[in-house]
Amino acid sequence: MRLCLHLLVYAFFLAVLALATGDGLTTQVTWDPYSLLVNGERLFLFSGEFAYERMPVPEMWSDIFQKFRANGFNAVSLYFFWSYHSASRDIFDFTSGGKDIQKVIDAAAEAGLYIIARPGPYANAETNAGGLALWTSDGSAGDYRTSDQAYYEAWEPWMREVNKILVKNQITEGGPIILYQIENELQETVHKADNTLVTYMEQLKKSVRDSGIVVPLTHNEKGQRSQSWSTDYQDVGGSVNIYGLDSYPGGLSCTNINTGFNLVRNYYQWFQNYSYTQPEFWPEFEAGWFQPWAGNFYDDCLAGMSNSWGGKFSAEHDPAFADVYYKNNIGQRGTLMSLYMAMGATNWGNLAAPVVYTSYDYSAPMRETRELQLKMSQTKLIALFTRVSQDLLYTNMESNGTGNAVSTQDIWTWVLRNPNTTAGFYVTQHSKSSSRAVTDFSISLKTSLGSITVPSVQLNGRQSKIVVSDYHFGEHTLLYSSVDVLTYGLFDRQSVLVLYLEVGQIGEYAFPGNVSIKSFGNMNVTASHVKVNGTASYTKFVYKQSASKTIVQLSNGVLLYLLDVSTAWSFWAPPTTLDPNVAADKQIFAIGPYLVRNASVSGKAVSVNGDNTNSTTLEVYVGNESVDTITWNGRILATKKTAYGALTADLTSVLDRKITIPSLTRWQVADCLPEVARSYDDSAWTVCNKTTTQAPVKPLSVPVLYSSDYGYYSGIKIYRGYFDGKSVTSANLTAQGGSAAGWSAWLNGKLVGGHSGNASLLSTSYVLDFTGVTLYDKDNVLTVVTDYTGHDQTSTGKGAANPRGLLGAALKSSGNTTASFKKWLIQGNAGGSANIDPVRGPLNEGGLYGERLGWHLPGFSPSGNEWSAGSPAGGLNSSGIKWYLTTFELDIDSDLDVPIGLELSAPPGTVASVQIYLNGYQYGKYIPHIGPQTRFPFPPGVINNQGNNTLALSVWAETDAGAKLDDVTLFAYNTYETSFNFARDWSYLQPGWTSERLRYA
């Protein structure tokens, strides 16, 4: 079938043409129905999402952004989580450690990336409370995400303060911010001016504009579920300048390779219906997907079936996803796309919402370990194509459908045409996008020399090709190509065009006129001169792709690289400018290494900096005959020059470099739950004395036991409830800590029950049986420890205002009569919202005894009778919580990047909750009876690559069966030579222990 064009809409579309629109506040960022324009130049915005909050080491932001830039991205999308920067009402930290917003902005600018700023106030993002400040979780902020005055008074200071930084970093001030998103996936289902959501959006717009934001405002539609905030559809207020549509269409699975992979083919029509005066924009487009508690572990998703490119991938990691889905967006005239997530990182220190566990790898193109997946390699090929393809930025939809311009109904083709240059883009894909069939077909192209049919085009299963016609690069025109264009470069005396194709497939391309060639490589490229209408002519070239590269010098002055896909994945085009909108004459080409971060020419040498692991040949093309030497990461290499003007040199493997990963020994252990003792001194604890609450959920008993009502928001909480008498037989408790969060209760030191948590339940109840417990006439003490996996996002109930901790507690006496607690006390993280460790922040810790006393901090020295030798392998023989502490040394060479992680395992049936602390950072939560995560990576800065490291584990045995860990092992994910400096003095990020911590016992 074909999608019919609505002629009236199309006529209007042609009428507005390229009349650029602005927001009336700046002319530096404008737009039209075709693309964004920055400083008057069209831009294909190829952005990736990164949450700096999930990587608390500012120096690693530069590492990540350099990798984004190297892989063709020209922008990064950044959430600014209110929750991360505001520990208490109207108090903000924008400078400590990983909270330094100016540093993350500078790192993006220094890497050559624009920024899409997304400060909320709500973010979602599978982060704690969806990014709302946790101090609002006591209900004091009223109705979230409405025009409620209490909510306005809560969020407005946040927006005002964060905008003080963002305003001065707009492009109008010389900064990298070009777009600014307000709110997040806020669905406008009622189009009435007096609707509370409209009022809320107007409040946000006024606050943002009053603060000095002048770049265009955007918003992201939550899938095709509503029609929200577009000036082109029922605009009753609250609309933004550029409408965006979030889409996660893959439906993929970690375990079933045949699930999903169904393309969405109505994007073009959707945008025509609801934002026809604006370019097509996906503020979030699927680059992966998150995994929940009890779901699949990302590392396990790396295995799968062999694909057509010879690798083994699950559907979520398959490079074919990037190839087919991102090209599908291009085929529907999309010119603004931000991939969520391009790099996910880690939910360290209670950053997670309950829907996810510690890892936020997200099956993203860049792994949590900062390593590049092959999905990133394929993404790079598309990003580099869009970076230089100016013809693509001004196109109309000419036709689309099954059998469109091709010889078979098995193929769907989108045909775009540039009305000014006549360039054509034929995006081909299988009609059934999940098909794994090998389909051969011919394609009919409209060219400046008439209609031409190209035979022997093939799609190998989940593959897409962009066939081009009259593709302009520099002073040259590629008449057509059935082979994907990767990129082109304009050098001093040479235009270089790069094409890529799967091994074994037939490629055909043509240039106008009579063109001869000289080839270098093992592929046979045949040339045929074809006359058209007696006078005009073109020369077509046909070849079969082999597992290598062949270079072709054309007599028209074009140098052509013909690459197989695997070789193309190792192709790089480092810019020689910091301008995110990279011109074709501001590049150097390189092939071979795992990563090329940057390159430059000075005198007779080309300096190339990057990362590598295996032995390979580095080939560099600079287009300057006087350059005869390659330096790699500062080392001069023995360099050769090829017959076609490139330079080559050998890079050696680093896999034989000695990396010593120490065994973890010399463990010390201490009891971490002295609070179960009836005699424990809790006189300094917070008394639970409230009989009412602002929370929207009614308590099950009084006093109110919600932790947020007493200033304890994140992490594990401990309660002590007192009652008198010997006639009490049981207690009914309900706790709510989030998905997978369990709880345990001890009466006068003896375990009386609890719940081990459930990945499908946010709250759990249990009747505690007091049989066999010694009771006293006075001051029986019920100690309850409640786990925590985050506050809810607004998609769950009342969102962040869903209480945490105990929801209610009721005693029963003999004869089924009711008894009462006479007092409840609560303890949470040291200092509560006082933010006593601003570098790591108050989200980092919970209320365990060892956490409060700072046993996880560098410099703490275990001493005294409470400490003894003992390892996690010995564990606990009954219920309780133990704290295990050790140190280890690393001495990794400064020219290496060695991502390091910790692997844990426990015997089958172990019911426990384990926290991992490294150098003071809570960098993992391991729940073996729920899972799935067993491996926890640490970034440099959290781990010291050179020097001493402090590792602590809290092991909570939730039953009297006890708990132990049969494996606690450090390991290296991989080894890379690198130009980036990972061996630094990280002490500023690792403040140590002081005796001030003793006051929180």
Image: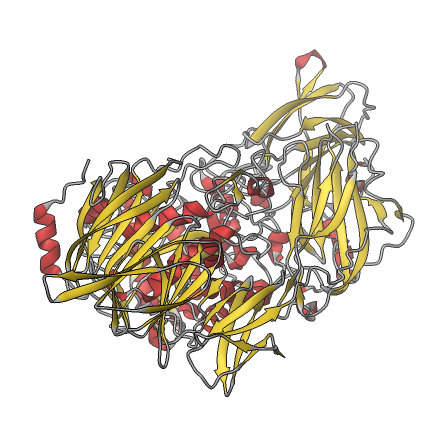
Viewer-closest of 530 and 235: 530
Determine whether, in the image, residue 98 is placed left or right of residue 273.
right
* Residue 96 seen: no
Q: Residue furthest bottom?
A: 603
Task: Name the spot of residue 658 as percent of width and height, x first.
Answer: 76, 62
Q: Residue furthest right?
A: 865
Q: Position of residue 102 (x, y in %)?
A: 49, 70
- In the rendering, at what x and y percent does residue 606 appear? 51, 80
Which quadrant would residue 593 be assigned to in this image?
bottom right
Render colour scheme: secondary structure
Q: How many marks?
A: 0
Residue at 85% of width from left, 50% of height from top? 665
Does residue 335 sit above or below 583 in this rendering? above
User: Is residue 566 at all visible to an observer of this figure?
Assistant: yes
Out of 314 and 229, give the one closest to the viewer.
314
102 left or right, relative to 327? right
> Which residue: 54% across, 78% down?
607
Q: Is 724 located above or below residue 55 in the figure?
A: above
* Quadrant placement of the N terminus: top left
Q: Is residue 6 left or right of residue 564?
A: left
Depicted 724 relative to depicted 155: above or below: above
Camera-side residue: 859 or 507?
507
Query: In the image, residue 756 lies at what x, y percent?
Result: 66, 29
Residue at x 59%, y 28% (from the top left corner): 764
